[in-house]
Amino acid sequence: MHHQWLLLAACFWVIFMFMVASKFITLTFKDPDVYGAKQEFPFLTTIPELEKWREEKHLPKELKPTGKVLSGNHLNQPLVHMERLELLKNVCQDAALRNLSHTTVSKFVLDRIFVCDKHKILFCQTPKVGNTQWKKVLIVLNGVFSSIEEIPENVVHDHEKNGLPRLSSFSDSEIQKRLKLYFKFFIVRDPFERLISAFKDKFVHNPRFEPWYRHEIAPGIIRKYRRNRTETRGLQFEDFVRYLGDPNHRWLDLQFGDHIIHWVTYVELCAPCEISYSVIGHHETLEEDAPYILKEAGIDHLVSYPTIPPGITVYNKTKVEHYFLGVSKRDIRRLYARFEGDFKLFGYQKPDFLLN
Ligand SMILES: *[C@@H]1O[C@H](CO)[C@@H](O)[C@H](O)[C@H]1NC(C)=O
Ligand SMILES: *[C@@H]1O[C@H](CO)[C@@H](O)[C@H](O)[C@H]1NC(C)=O
Ligand SMILES: *[C@@H]1O[C@H](CO)[C@@H](O)[C@H](O)[C@H]1NC(C)=O
């Protein structure tokens, strides 16, 4: 008799766990540049759906809704992030870099920042570091959709419908309140590798659903910056670098509208010296940084993460050298002169192998 009651209680517990587990969400991570077009790997993993859990209910050891076990690296995480913020603070105060590290918190910046009111999180979007996946997490956490799979692709970037408002949609006092009180984060990667990634993604692979890169932006850059008039190929990395390094680039930027978010500096996107971010993740250490961000944001019990395949986010010097091979030293130095703020603020090494 006693055993039957125990069994019944155990059954209720298992059912309860299934219901809890069904609330968890899934994520996949995509970076066509590093991982080959279309290839995806799970990044913040999804705890399987209710049905799958039911099938597995006779295997109680599967019930643990956690990702991988914490590794020793995590013990040093707070220190690493404190040092990053300390470096940022110091570089922000460097008068010689003032023009490269400071910007006004304009509507352009407020447009980049997404708001999760439910969990008091602000996320500044920096393309090419898995941002769509972070946005999906926040959309689910905000509650308009109950799982990542339910969000239609076309709604991820439609902020009227996805319940993930931009900070710019609030009144001044509401903006100030959120900037002061919320957990704020964004992700960066090596500035030159990021530009290569943007170039490949927007001008080489050139997604069909984004025709403006090939038909408007590339011709605009070629008209102004191509030296070799007999060259008829599409936009070359060399042209792109010359445009980015031109101190008068703003003239073209204005015509390109918000598409410039793929190549303007992190300073211009997120105003890291004006807004006191809680955590700045690095793409190169995403395996440690992603779980740290989830934990610090207080959402690690809602979202889990699996192992990121080793080496996949590592900085590739060979690739950087290859892309800059045909670019003149003068143009590379001008490019560095514009992105020096990003290199120094986030602790990326000056690429002397390209500059000298
Ligand atoms: C910063 O920009 C201002 C205005 O464009 C300019 O006058 C000043 O010389 C610049 N400072 C440095 C250190 O480049
Ligand atoms: C200009 O481009 C053409 C066509 O690609 C090429 O054959 C030629 O060598 C280039 N000239 C220079 C000076 O790079
Ligand atoms: C680095 O990039 C080069 C050229 O794109 C590629 O052949 C190589 O496999 C990459 N190395 C790593 C470790 O990913």
Image (spheres, rainbow, N blue to C red):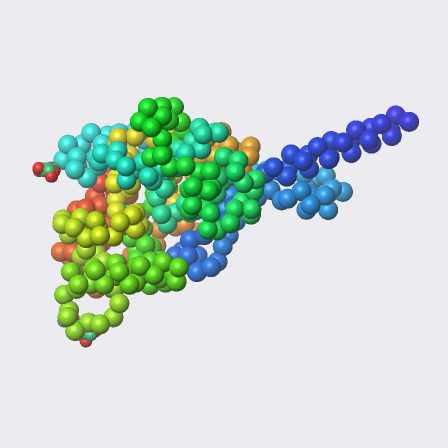
Placement of 134 over or under 2, stated as above or below: below
Q: Quadrant of the N terminus?
A: top right
Q: Could you say which quadrant of the image residue 354 lies in?
A: bottom left
Q: Nearer the viewer, residue 109 or 340?
A: 109
- Looking at the image, residue 35 sits to the left or right of residue 148; the answer is left
Is there any visible trace of residue 197 in the rendered image? Answer: yes
Q: Nearer the viewer, residue 13 or 206?
A: 206
Placement of 343 over or under 278, stated as above or below: below
- Looking at the image, residue 315 sits to the left or right of residue 142; the answer is left
Q: Could you say which quadrant of the image residue 93 lies in?
A: top left
Residue 293 x, y percent position in the rendering? 44, 35
- Looking at the image, residue 168 sits to the left or right of residue 334; the answer is right
Instruction: Tell me the residue at 26%/47% (across/down).
Output: 264
Residue 355 x, y percent position in the rendering? 18, 53
Residue 112 x, y percent position in the rendering? 34, 40
- Looking at the image, residue 56 sits to the left or right of residue 227; the answer is right
Instruction: Tell me the residue at 48%/51% (across/down).
Output: 153
Q: Quadrant of the C terminus?
A: bottom left
Instruction: Tell me the residue at 30%/59% (across/down).
Output: 213
Placement of 311 over or under 60, stated as above or below: below
Q: Nearer the viewer, residue 240 or 152?
A: 152
Placement of 299 over or under 39, stated as above or below: above
Residue 67 x, y percent position in the rendering? 57, 40
Is there any visible trace of residue 81 in the rendered image? Answer: no
Instruction: Tell me the residue at 72%/39% (across/down).
Output: 60
Quarter of image, ligand 2: bottom left
